[in-house]
Image (tube, rainbow, N blue to C red):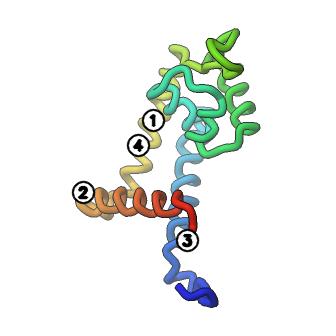
Amino acid sequence: MSQGETVGPLGESAGYALKQAASALRAAMDAVLRPLDLTVPQYACLELLERRPGLSSAELARGAFVTRQATHGVLRGLAERGLVTRAPSAPHGRALPVELTDAGREALRAASTAVRAVERRMLAPLGAERERRLREDLAACAAALAEPAP
């Protein structure tokens, strides 16, 4: 792309199509999580904690794609509902590890099932090979943007 070139028609922009897909996915996830009294960031934190118990709020923020400040509110809401616990003191440094409770695991099972159904609906038109290719292509796009710009 030359320095003066613009995005052009939005219908031909991969970035715009990606944003549309991300927005549609978020809306569908919101819809299935709302009856479970969970938000997408809360769900993301539960999934992360299931896979990596003891993450700090900063690590959860990075994994859930929210700010550290937003994570504080997310964790407070989850803790008030008894879905997570925070250690009373940090084993090292200042980071207080967070873990799922039994109620948190139960809520996660329901939420994960609902979100998986959304993902299956989203990917149904693709078939297995195109789904695999999509994952690889999206990972390559993310990796390209993680590198410093030339």
Query: Mark 2: which amino acid?
Result: Ala
- Counting residues from the N terminus, which is met first, the one under dot 4 or under dot 3? 4
Residue 24 in view of the camera: no
Whether label 1 touches label 3, CB < 8 Å: no
Q: Find disc 3 in the rendering and name its residue.
A: 150
Q: Among all residues in the image, which is located at the extreme front?
A: 150
Query: Is residue 87 in view from this perspective?
Result: yes
User: What's the residue at 52%, 55% (across, down)?
Assistant: 25
Q: What crowding class fits label 3: few (fewer than 14 Cα within 10 Å), some (14-19), or many (20 or more)?
A: few
Residue found farthest to the left: 129
Instruction: Report the mark closest to the observer, 1 or 3.
Output: 3
Q: Are marks 1 and 4 in contact (CB under 8 Å)?
A: yes
Looking at marks 1 and 3 on the same chain, the residue that comes earlier in the sequence is marked by 1
Q: Amino acid at mark 3?
A: Pro
**Residue 112 in which image quadrant:** top left
* Label 1 or label 2, whichever comes before in sequence order: 1
Lower position in the chain sequence, tag 2 or tag 4: 4
Residue closest to the far top: 88
* Disc number placed over residue 112 in the picture, else none: 1
Query: Which amino acid type is marked by label 1?
Result: Ser
Instruction: For marks 4 and 3, give the one nearer the viewer.
Output: 3
Closer-to-camera residue (47/141):
141
Determine which residue is flagged by label 4. 116
